[in-house]
Image: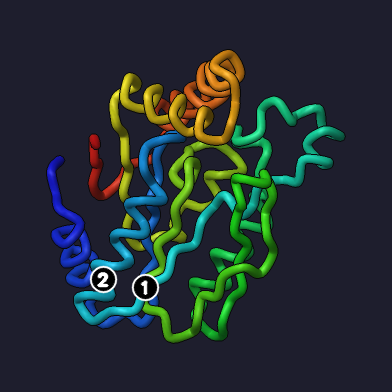
Amino acid sequence: MTMTTEDIARTLIDRAGEKRRFIVAIAGPPGAGKSTTASELATALKTLGESAEVLPMDGFHMDNDVLREKVLLSRKGAPETFDVRGFLDIIRAVRLAEAEVLVPVFDRSRELAIAAARIIDVSTRFVLVEGNYLLLDRAPWSSLEGQFDYAILISPSVATLEERLMERWRGYGLSEEAARAKTEDNDLRNGALVRNQCRGADIILTD
């Protein structure tokens, strides 16, 4: 489906009606462009006179020490490597819109989640939640069903995802071999899971 960022922003405003808090899920495989889309959409909403903030799911990565203990470090980014309960607690608190909520943000350059790194103010009307598994129809992620007012799925071709992911990992200084391993053995596997076990979205963007 072809829609401009402004088109989507206007659709969200129309859907939100008089709601004081409207939560949007922006889901998709690794490399789909979720962070970029969320940032651009937040800017578009602000340009149209609304308040908006991005809440990234990546802030809920388990720490590397925890992943080593669980023998999951090589699978970092897979569904089982996130603090889903903590994420759900934050989403529920944001949904209440009763007070400001401090949320963590992931620093990919250091592979580290930074606690309380972003504020979702009580006055923020649109909260754009972005992450791989927001629509994953598998426990415990399925507990998120009903928490979002609108859902966007970004699903580019596998070839596009592979190209973007290889470029990402090269950009972080990985060798060609290490970047290929990260891309094929982890990211594309996780992406296939997102595509194959995803609940329905209000709109699907293919690029």
Q: Quadrant of the N terminus?
A: top left
Q: Quadrant of the C terminus?
A: top left
Query: What residue appears at the point 59 percent right and 39 percent down from the top-left corner?
Result: 139
Q: Where, by quadrant of the figure, is residue 191 drawn?
A: top left
Instruction: Report, in whole angstroms, how far the alpha carbon at label 1 lies from the one at label 2.
Output: 7 Å
Contact flag, marks 1 and 2 (Cβ < 8 Å): yes
> Residue 190: horizontal and vertical position, in percent?
52, 28
158 and 15: which is toward the camera:
158
Q: Residues within 10 Å of mark 2 (few under 14, many from 20)?
A: many
Residue 197 visible to the viewer: no
> Residue 116: horizontal and vertical position, in percent?
66, 69
> Residue 187: horizontal and vertical position, in percent?
52, 27
Q: Which residue is mark 2?
A: 45
Q: Amino acid at mark 1?
A: Ala
Label 1: which secondary element: strand
Furthest-right residue in view?
Answer: 69
Q: Is residue 126 above or below residue 157?
A: below
- Compared across the picture, whether 94 is left or right of 60 comes to left
Q: Amino acid at mark 2?
A: Leu
Residue 93 visible to the viewer: yes
Query: What residue appears at the point 29 percent right and 61 percent down from the top-left corner?
Result: 41
Q: Residues within 10 Å of mark 1 (few under 14, many from 20)?
A: many
Query: What residue appears at the point 54 percent right and 85 percent down from the top-left corner?
Result: 98
Q: Where, by quadrant of the figure, is residue 16 drawn?
A: bottom left
Disc assigned to residue 52: 1
